[in-house]
Amino acid sequence: MKEKISKLANKLISGTLSLRLLSIVLAVCLWSLVVNTEDPIETRTFSNVEVEIINSDVISNLNQSYQIKNGERISFSIRGKKSIVDKMKKSDFEVTADLSELSSVNAVPIKIVAKKYANNIEIVFGNDKTLTLEIEDMQQIQVPVIAETTGNAADGYTVGTKTTNPNLVSIKGPVSIVKDLKQVKVLVDISGADKDIVTEVTPICYDSDGKQVSSDRITLDASKIKVNIEIWRTKKIDLTVRTTGTPADGYTVGTIDYEPQSIYVAGENDDLKNISELELPVVNVRGKKSAVEKTVDLNSISLPKGITLAQTDTSVMIKVNIDQTDEKNLTISSDDISIMNNDQNYQVEFLDDSLRLTLSGLKTAVANTTISDLNPQIDLSGLETGEHTVTIKLNDINNVEVSGSRRIRINLVDDTTEDTEATE
């Protein structure tokens, strides 16, 4: 009987332990279910994250330069509980590439370290796990500085001398960039300027094709260039043309056409006072029977000290016309002659009936010239009664020369005296 009671007791105890164990297991499962439901495991991706370069002096100490080919920005994911993952930002991670770990193929491993919750999340890389570089030697050269202006000075003024300080700059950068550098320019706006401009300007680099070079990978020993732009007064002066030599027999120099006939020059006031015209190079017409044409570049002409051209158009087109010559005779009678300044109302008697003149010069000009064009005149200013030999004044005719005596004899009679004698 005792044995039966003992066995029954053991079964009860054993059943109670099993129930307890089962309860514990069920409780754990229930807790886990509740936790995972309220704070599940999530994955979050961060895109376009910049990779920080460290220990770059490893390359610069070798007088080399680098450029990132791949891996400058990457994407990565983190996995962890929602309550933690939702709190994380890009700034909570250090994403670095240590150039001291550069491989023989110029690759550097990218490392991602969480600044917080590092033990609660898992970091998963995207496709980019390494940063690759392009490395080349550095070079240093000296390049001239050129000052250029934009805009226009005030009316009556123009740009004079342009100077920079320094006039040379040292540029250091990768060989592939530096080898093509040709100029450093500084641009100054002179719009409306009527006095000298002194300013400081950031230099701009240009290659051999005139294209601007980015300053990202090069360094200049001068970040600012001092520029002095002189603003000069301008003056309009005439151009003159002369010829040398004699055309062929029967020909002569006709009209001389050239354009422009005047130009603008610039300089200090005292220098401008001393210039009123500029003579162009002489045109040789020796033995010519037809027009001579010539183009002159004003830049080839030596200007007086302190004077410079104040215009961009520097070409002058010259045409010296060569025409045939001709002659003809004209007879001027007393009826053709006008009397000038006969204040005393003298009666004018011509003692010579006429005079004969010879016209010579350009064929067309000679043919078209008439006595009325010459407009013959005699001037009686200061003359008294009696006989006088006077000179006939004639108009000048372009491209026509007049030869022959222009002297004529006249007798001046006082009409008042004759009237008085007749009355007596």
Image (cartoon, helix red, strand yellow):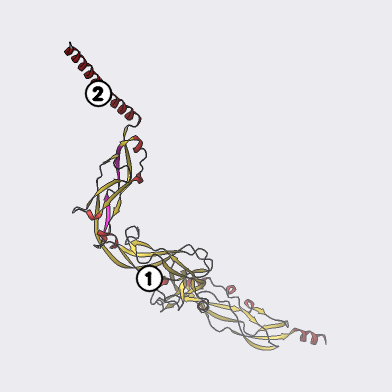
Provide the residue designation for mark 1: 167
Please state which amino acid type lies under the numbered disc 2: Leu
Q: Which residue occupies the foreground of this view, 19 or 43?
A: 19
Q: Can residue 191 be seen?
A: yes
Looking at the image, is 33 positioned above or below residue 324?
above
User: Please, what is the dominant secondary structure of the magenta stretch?
Assistant: strand
Task: Evaluate if marks 2 and 1 touch, with contact meaning CB atoms under 8 Å apart.
Answer: no
Does dot 1 land on a helix, a strand or a loop?
Answer: loop
Within the magenta stretch, is there residue 78? Answer: yes
Provide the residue designation for mark 2: 21
Span of residues in magenta: 65-79
Looking at the image, is 410 positioned above or below residue 276?
below
Q: Position of residue 134 (x, y in %)?
A: 24, 54
Mark 2–mark 1 distance (CA, rounded to whole Å): 92 Å
Q: Position of residue 62 (x, y in %)?
A: 23, 62
| Quadrant where the N terminus is found in the figure | top left
Relative placement, left or right, of 99 versus 305 is: left
Q: Residue at x 54, y 80 (%)?
A: 357
Mark 1 neighbour class, 10 Å CA radius: few under 14, some 14 to 19, many 20 or more: some
Relative placement, left or right, of 297 versus 78 is: right
Tell me the number on the disc at residue 340: none
Q: Earlier in the sequence, mark 2 or mark 1?
A: 2
Please state which amino acid type lies under the numbered disc 1: Asn
